[in-house]
Amino acid sequence: MEAIEIIRSRTVVLAQANVDTDQIIPARFLTTTSRDGLGAHLFADHRFDAHGQPRADFVFNTAEAAGCQVLVAGHNFACGSSREHAPWALLDFGVRAVISTGIADIFRTNALRNGLLPVVVDDDFHKKLLASPGTEVEIDLRRGTVTLPDGAHAEFEIEPFARFCLLEGVDPLGYLLSKEPEIRHYEGERAWRP
Amino acid sequence: MTATDQRQSETGGPRTLFDKIWDRHVVVPETNMVPAVLYVDLHLIHEVTSPQAFDLLRQRQLPVRCPERCLATVDHSVPTSPASWQIRLADMDVAPRNQIRKLDANCGRSGIRLLGINHSRRGIVHVIGPELGATQPGMTVVCGDSHTTTHGAFGALAFGIGTTEVAHVLATQCLLQRRPKTLAVEMRGRLPEGVTAKDAVLAMIGRIGVDGGTGHVIEFRGEAVRAMSMDARMTLCNMAIEAGARAGMVAPDEVTFDYLAGRPMAPKGEEWEAAIERWRHLKGDPGATFDAQVSMDVSDLAPQVTWGTDPGMVAPVTGRVPESAGQAALEYMGFAPGEPIEGRRVDVVFIGSCTNSRLSDLRQAASILTGRKVAKGVRALVVPGSQETKRRAESEGLDRVFLEAGAEWHESGCSMCIAMNGDRAGGGQTVVSTSNRNFEGRQGSGARTILASPLTAAASAVAGAVADPRSFLDQKRRIA
Ligand code: SF4
């Protein structure tokens, strides 16, 4: 995995709360056996109308959204299904970080495992971001800060081990595999009944 | 968990049910720097979230570590309609067909037991685990599926994971996990006639919100929960994820043991006796505390229905859409603020999904449909959760009740819960559904979902509009 330290980008804002993973990528696109190319279906039912034409009023279809790597989302972003296709689709589309006041548990883990930064900030800072779509932000993973052009900033926390893995470009599976002796020991010790 | 918490549970302070299961599965304790390495007893697998995980193992030349701890089936993308099965699924698309073939190959190669497309015990992954007795008290259970919370009904710690973590479990039988917080949800009193576990859990989500359980494992307790059947407890735990919770659980008791006795994968003979002995200890110690608590009296609860686009947008069936309801949800659903929900015209009724497709759910639906007809212009689908449930229902004659009422009787699978297998509703159609998610487009692009219990769904099928099932329950035809 590629190491991540700093992300600088303009923001795209999707203010609605409780945007679920079915919105991020509808289930009919989950028949794939690959993780590639899912960006084409990101927010499919919002980006395209029934005839497959782009909806001009959806934020991801606007000219300003092009090239934005940071999504500012409403509270409880990506609730619902555990589909890892959601972070895969966002990353494939070019989104590298999501900033919200709350991000659903399973999605947060999935995002971290794929190098998509789930950034949870306080309400006031979030309001500021919502009010200024397209603003340039700097997300500094090592320092755990999001900074706006006027110098205003917020702190965020990422689970320390996931943060370490992202900063160093390390795959956590390697760590789990290195615990094989402990796993064997556990299996030997435990009476094999639930 | 802080260092103090950890010491407390190690030094034998009072522990909750969750604490006991967690502690027993910690291979390497967590520190500030690293999460715990948590052992997984049962890994359930389905066709949609697993192919990329098997690929990852192949890329790294890793074997599946414990194939005997895995159980796989196909459910999400399998067509359920009798017409499809009559032509031996010839109408099935290439992509899902490929997905199913991949699972076949992956399981074959790694020695994982697969209840494949033609297997007699195939079904929705969260229905067959319990039905086979694979899900047992005290276990850790994971699956690449958020409704894995269902299995917590047995006093297991069960939660959904993403595909990368599916690969972690395949490779190491372990997961990296931070200890979640605990939330006690107490349901006081007894559910009234015509009101079910589905209504209770919808009411709970309405109360704590769709993120009310975030970061927490819910333990459902109280008189109403103790009085519930295993099917009902599974409905309850199934929907814990809709409140954002990591897991839902119910302490095992005689109801649990009776359910498991004699199941194909449950312990037998002396082992069974020993298992029950151990399982009896799986309950919170007196004085054990939770990080948060909610208490609700369910004794005068009304049947609940959703009016919006997430499961927290819920009201009594006799109620109205709130005046304060959000514009986007109202527009999508075609509701006006303050509009009564009962009487809303219905196009489709879906009775199925891992929330409500078990035998007692089907019996409840049948209790209302017996001798009645699905209203003209309404399409009603009844989709059993597994092939075994289907056979049992048929041996009781439930299929005839549904067919005579004018409903469709399908093969098992996820069906219209997820609309990626041929069963879907049309844009703008209103669906009363016993499934778990009323998200936009979940049951088909533009389809409008109203979540409800099997009783409410069946009553709505007959009325052709959202209906209160209590007015359909007469003394003679009631089925427990
Ligand atoms: S029935 Fe629905 S919620 Fe349950 S596993 Fe299938 S798709 Fe998921």
Image (cartoon, rainbow, N blue to C red):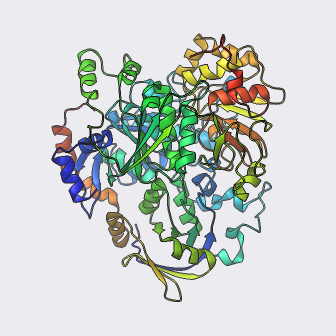
Coordinates of residue B122 in the picture (x, y in percent): 51, 27
Farthest residue to the bottom: give it: A150
Coordinates of residue B59 in the picture (x, y in percent): 39, 54
Q: Is residue B423 visible?
A: no
Coordinates of residue A51 in the picture (x, y in percent): 80, 55
**Ligand 1 lies in quarter:** top right
Q: Quadrant of residue B365?
A: top right
Coordinates of residue B357 in the picture (x, y in percent): 57, 28
Is residue A149 left or right of B338 when viewed as pictured? left
Is residue B438 left or right of B9 when viewed as pictured? right
As drawn, B168 above or below B363: below
Number of disc labels:
0
As drawn, B338 above or below B455: below
Residue drawn at (57%, 41%), measured in percent from left and top?
Answer: B203
Q: Quadrant of the C terminus of chain B?
A: top right
Q: Is residue B442 visible?
A: yes
Q: Quadrant of the N terminus of chain B?
A: bottom left
As drawn, B57 above or below B347: below
Of residues B10 and B74, the one nearer the viewer is B10
Residue drawn at (48%, 30%), measured in percent from left and top?
Answer: B189
Residue drawn at (61%, 55%), measured in percent from left and top?
Answer: A25
Farthest residue to the right: give it: B376
Residue drawn at (28%, 27%), measured in percent from left and top?
Answer: B280
Is residue B470 left or right of B179 when viewed as pictured? right
As drawn, B473 above or below A147: above
